[in-house]
Image (tube, rainbow, N blue to C red):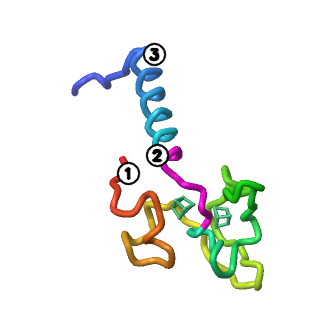
């Protein structure tokens, strides 16, 4: 039986750094338009708007799951990559449209 491979700490740290960099690069691509959160019709109750017009989510690190829109509709917040490419409201404006993630 082959011995289990245990990567040295430096390799693990390098890998974690690359993942963090990829995540930051992917997040930076967002235009903060808020359209994927319903900004143009019935926004999620967690969607906030800055004075400069950009949007942000007030629970972003724990956003995934079921939430409510301002009109009371229930919906499930999913990762942007889980949305069908090009077939959701506002997709034409999304910076991730047609892009591969990781
Ligand atoms: S919970 Fe989801 S849908 Fe609601 S504002 Fe945050 S990211 Fe957008
Ligand atoms: S629609 Fe796309 S670009 Fe606009 S906030 Fe959502 S993820 Fe970002």
Helix, strand or loop for the magenta stretch, by majority: loop
* Residue beneath disc 2: 26
Q: Which residue lies furthest to the front in this view?
A: 52
3D distance between C-alphas at marks 2 and 1: 7 Å
For mark 3, give the secondary structure: helix
Residue 96 point in image, percent of width and height: 42, 58
Inspect the magenta stretch and tell me whether residue 30 lies in it. yes
Q: Quadrant of the N terminus?
A: top left
Asked if the residue at tag 3 contacts the one at tag 2, i.e. Cβ–Cβ closer than 8 Å, the answer is no
Q: Tell me the crowding category of disc 1: few under 14, some 14 to 19, or many 20 or more residues within 10 angstroms, Cα based.
A: few
For mark 2, give the secondary structure: helix
Which corner quadrant of the figure contains ligand 2?
bottom right
> Measuring 46% from the left and 77% from the top, which residue is drawn there?
88
Q: Is 13 placed left or right of 68 in the picture?
A: left
Asked if the residue at tag 1 contacts the one at tag 3, i.e. Cβ–Cβ closer than 8 Å, the answer is no
Q: Pick whichever, 100 or 9, lies toward us.
A: 100
> Measuring 37% from the left and 21% from the top, which residue is drawn there?
6
Residue 75 vertical placement versus 60 (above, below): below
For mark 1, give the secondary structure: loop
* Residue beneath disc 1: 101
């Amino acid at each position: 039986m082959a011995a289990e491979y245990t990567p040295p700490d430096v390799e693990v740290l390098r890998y974690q750094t690359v993942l963090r960099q990829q995540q930051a690069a992917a997040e930076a691509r967002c235009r903060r338009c808020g359209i994927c959160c319903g900004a143009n019709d019935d926004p999620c109750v967690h969607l906030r708007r800055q004075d400069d017009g950009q949007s942000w989510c007030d629970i972003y690190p724990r956003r995934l799951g079921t939430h409510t829109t301002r009109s009371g509709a229930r919906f499930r917040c999913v990762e942007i990559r889980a949305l069908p490419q090009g077939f959701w409201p506002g997709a034409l404006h999304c910076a991730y449209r047609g892009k591969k993630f990781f």
